Amino acid sequence: MEDPIKRRNRGPTWPLDSRIESLRGPPSQSDRFQRFCLALRGLPIGPINGPKNTLGHFKSQMLAPQRKALPIASVASRIVEEVKNNDTLIIVGETGSGKTTQLPQFLFDAGLCSDGKVIGITQPRRVAAVSVAKRVAEECGVELGQRVGYSIRFDDVTSNSTRIKYMTDGLLLREALLDPFLSRYCVIIIDEAHERTVHTDVLLGLLKNVQNARSKYATTEYDHSKKDSLSEKGCNGLRQTKLLTCQDTKLAPLKLVIMSASLDARVFSRYFGGAKAVHVQGRLYPVEILYTYHPEPDYVDAALITIFQIHLNECSGDVLVFLTGQEEIEFVERRIKEGTDQLPDEKKNVVVVPIYSSLPSEQQMKVFKPAPSGFRKVILATNVAETSVTIPGIKYVVDPGLVKVRCYNPVTGVESLIVIPTSKAQALQRSGRAGREGPGKCFRLYPESEFAKLRDSIIPEIKRCNISNVVLQLRALGIKDILGFDFIDKPPRMAVVKSLEQLLLLGALTKDYELSDPVGYQMAQIPLDPLYSKALILAREFNCLEEMLIVVAMLSVESIFYIPHEKLEKAKVAMRCFSSPEGDHTTLINVYRASKEVLDKSRAAGGDEKMAERGLSKWCKENFINKRSLKHARDVHSQVHGYVKQMGFAVTSCGDDMLQFRRCLAASFFLNVALRQPDGTFRALGSNQTVRIHPSSVLFRSKAECVIFNELVRTNQNYLRNVTSVDPLWLPELAPHYFSLREP
Ligand SMILES: Nc1ncnc2c1ncn2[C@@H]1O[C@H](COP(=O)(O)OP(=O)(O)OP(=O)(O)O)[C@@H](O)[C@H]1O
């Protein structure tokens, strides 16, 4: 794929300039950063950054000239005509050209919503849906939630007057469960389609069906009392019973627009029967791309040095750095703070802001806040900030060229998180986060020759992840023949077979592969992994829904314990206070309840929320708990709690009867059982793999004979994480359909 962004020769102080080269010593790369910091102390000081030119406060009229200057503005009427004339349109335009923010406004202004219908725009990520909606509401001069709104899981800021609605692709998929004809929408725009998330891929297939169904019924006044009615049959031709509430009596054809800066238009055009593709030419500002001379053996170290070089040598402007995950981000955050401490006072003007997917939405939104006057903001991000978002102030992008992805082996059931090189499309998207408010620079931490070797685009998620949830949702939509479903790229056959098998064993499907009543329908309503939603349903019977809600919330976030290498022993002592001999699940409950006690005590003592949070921060620090993960777990808990309450579940506790809770864990996670072998390793029954308990588990050194687990991850070997010991004799009793043929 051609990288259209302007290239120029390498800058004078980058890559890793002579000062650094001369510091290059023995192989320890973190040493190199330390020596770099020492060298910084003697550096001459450049001008201090001036105040930021942030656009946050500009109102609608002030933004108008900016909107007019966007490349897409000059072709607005042509694009509107193309949308009117084509059922499906593919739009490819450079990053920042105005696709996401402008196209919905053009369509609204052209009267496409005049009959009260809505333009829906999907984004692969929450942060993009929220931030773009805010921006568009500002551009339109309306209050967010009125004409322009957003809807993401657990957060709906729309109203009856919303006509331009940004949302995640997952959310639109859930809406399709309730309204299979998406009857509220006149146009659906699938933005950033190149990301090929599972949700986007499933949506594309569904939307094709919805389009067909709606065109068929477009001209007829619809009578719902008819036997063969659309609402009864579903647009996929299959009987829908439970979840469908199609209320419209007349459905206009659905317009579909597929957009991205970096997609292969031919693939999408073929999929949509030769749909028309248009290219929007031009970009607002140039982005200079710089490559390193040599491959960098330690990209984290190279990123740190580059950040400081930018801070010391480049003029004002914020920096966006792409890293692979929360732990890495937190490590770099600490190193930047250490490095900044060593700088002269007038150069300490750096603020670091992290963003990754497991951060709660309101914390993610902090990246959009301008840095204090005179400060440079350094944003450390995973690929959540890779597409769609415009972060005001960003002038520099640092891209090590790596991304962490989930890989699932349906045969062994092993899921691994691996770090792989980005695709060209991703590199393009990352550099496109600069150059949106003025010229920018992107520092790619690899040689140009490596860029040429990158894949054009990432392997679609549907080909490399566990698709049980997708299969459940498709079944809930009445789609029985999953393999026959019109996917743009089919998932591996084995993944579909394994998912069906899993859903059958969990009781979500009947023997005829129909959604079971009520379990299957209830599971489809809870937006969690099917194993977790089943655990919540079962927990009612075992009287331990309170405990299971905590566990599900704590398992939904990244590591709760934060164990720095240099304080390993201290951290282990602190962890022991929460450790339960039964396993990690009860340990997680102990942590959650202890943290709640800290908050409750502070509130009872008359402290305000801020004081309670400060007390919690102190407690987290003393106990080596990752406060961000804990906060996220509290959010997930309150959201899922809301869901189960809505479904009429009573949230009761088993009190001190942890035996009951462990039996519930065994009944819920019977698919993930491992038995101790004579040599001390374990055998995972489902996959027959030899596994070990991860050193981070409280059962690492235990003599447990039989355990259930929530994660089987592969690093240098197969490890089980989140493990609890169970009595093997419970298994045939609690999951007879699975264990009658086995001998645990
Ligand atoms: N929050 C914001 N603050 C400042 N400028 C913004 C903001 N959002 C958008 N813009 C301006 O609007 C332009 C168009 O943004 P938009 O997201 O519509 O582009 P796009 O073509 O969809 O880009 P991408 O392909 O990267 O998603 C940006 O380049 C930027 O100049």
Image (tube, grey):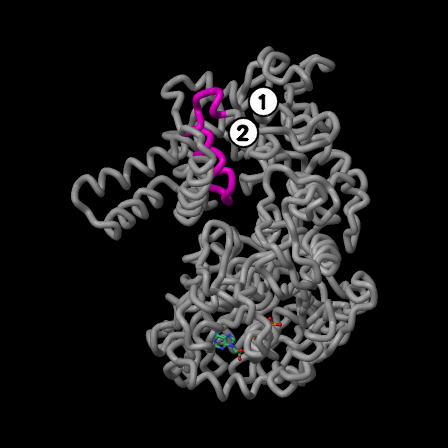
Q: Give coordinates of residue 89: x percent, y percent.
A: 72, 70
The range drawn in magenta is 539-560
Q: Quadrant of residue 214?
A: bottom right
**Residue drawn at 30 percent across, 46 percent down:** 618
The amino acid sitting under disc 2 is Ala
Q: Which residue is mark 1?
A: 707
Query: In the rendered view of the protein, which quadrant contains the N terminus?
Result: bottom right
Q: Which residue is mark 2?
A: 535
For ligand 1, the image quadrant comes to bottom right
Number of dots carrying numbers = 2
**Residue drawn at 63 percent across, 18 percent down:** 735
Front residue of this view, candidates 723 and 599 = 599
Q: Quadrant of residue 603?
A: top left
Give yes or no for residue 708 being in the magenta stretch: no
Classed neighbour count for the residue bearing mark 1: other residues with Cα under 10 Å, few (<14), some (14–19), many (≥20): many
User: Which label's residue is closer to the chain start, 2 or 1?
Assistant: 2
Magenta span: chief secondary structure: helix
Instruction: State whether residue 119 is above or below residue 179.
Output: below
Tell us which disc is closer to us: 2 or 1. Answer: 2
Q: Which mark is residue 362?
A: none
Instruction: State whether residue 127 is above or below residue 711.
Output: below
Instruction: State whether residue 73 is above or below residue 235.
Output: below
Q: Give coordinates of residue 88: x percent, y percent.
A: 73, 67
**Residue drawn at 60 percent across, 66 percent down:** 387
